[in-house]
Amino acid sequence: MLAALPVAAEEVAYITCQNGDALSVIDLAAGTEIDRWPVPGKPAGVAVSHGGVFTVSADSKTLRKHDPHSGAIIKSTTLDGGPIGVAHDAARGQLFVSDWYNARIWVLDDSRLATRDELTVGAAPAGLAISEDGRFVASADRDADQVSIFDADTLDLRHRVDVGTRPFGLRFAPDGRLFVGNVGSNDLTVIDAAGGGVQATVPVGERPYGVAFAKGRAFVTNQYEDSVSVIDLKTLEPVATLTTGEYPEGIDTSSDGTRIVVANWFDNSITIFDAEALSVLNEIDTCDGPRAFGVFLMGDSE
């Protein structure tokens, strides 16, 4: 174990490492890993807040709530199925966890990790996302080639939307649109979340995985091209293609919107980009097999 997380860290990345059964805690300003937590069971999914860091270990079917400073396990539970993705609805005190094997989403209390409800979705749900205004929660139903959108307050199904082939990662843009990465058709589906209509299909690189937003742009990791596609949010036209480490997966935006952070699974590293200049600011080593599937950055302002 390394030094405990400093309370005053400007921005911290919590990077789940599937191969290493661990989580790297990285101070972005210092440019160094400041802690490493043991997380058995091949962790992939992650969701962070000041109230806790939530990890999902697929092999052991374990959902854990960690103290964000020490890594100590506050609470854990075993879910009978195939948990993979996680999203935290802090305003309502609830977690959403996707069940890859049983076409459902668990809704859990974020304190006790007790199940409140189960939502039916399409086959092999993976990524989960909550809109910035808190109105909607969405799941990427990979083997159904669709997205399910629910009312986050009532948990009623609002829409099922056909997308590209094998959607996996997704995220809501600041303007409320839902961007879905389709790993099988190498494109993004852009959805009007409120109305449920598809607004556009946008080509990106090979095997798009995760999506993040900053400076009026969408950033999409392309696993098989070791790159990030940068898309203008107004025109949906390509802006640039950025080179990452090998096999980029998780991607997130710093709390101030100035940096994009990418987890490189095969390189055991993260790459930090300037979101405006689109240049590399730093590359930092992590534990083995970083996936960081979800929201993994936390800043002082959050």
Image: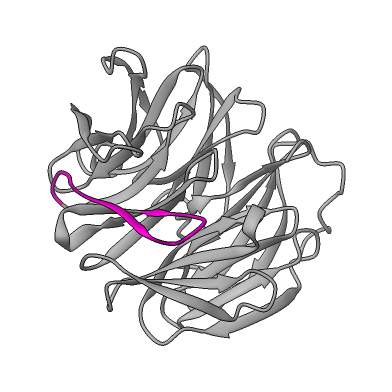
Residue 211 in view: yes
Does the magenta segment cover residue 93? Answer: no
**Percent coordinates x, y for residue 262 in the rendering:** 48, 39
Q: Is residue 142 left or right of residue 8?
A: left
Task: Kindly identify the residue that appears in the image at 63 percent across and 58 percent down.
Answer: 92
Q: Is residue 244 above or below residue 95?
A: above
> Relative to the observer, which residue lies in front, 252 or 25?
252
Does the magenta segment cover residue 152? Answer: yes
- Residue stretch in magenta: 150-165
Task: Kindly identify the residue that appears in the image at 74 percent across and 59 percent down.
Answer: 51
Q: Is residue 162 above or below residue 191?
A: below
Task: Kindly identify the residue that appears in the image at 76 percent across and 36 percent down.
Answer: 301
> Relative to the observer, which residue lies in front, 164 or 263?
164
Task: Kindly identify the residue that appears in the image at 34 percent across and 49 percent down.
Answer: 169
Q: How is the image coloured?
A: one colour
Q: Is residue 108 left or right of residue 35?
A: left
| Quarter occupied by the C terminus | top right
> Relative to the observer, which residue lies in front, 101 or 11?
101
In terms of image quadrants, where is residue 73? bottom right
**Percent coordinates x, y for residue 96 in the rendering:** 49, 64
In terms of image quadrants, where is residue 172? top left
**Percent coordinates x, y for residue 36 in the rendering:** 68, 62
Residue 288 in view: no
Q: Is residue 118 above or below residue 156?
A: below
Tell how many labels: 0
| Quarter occupied by the N terminus | bottom right
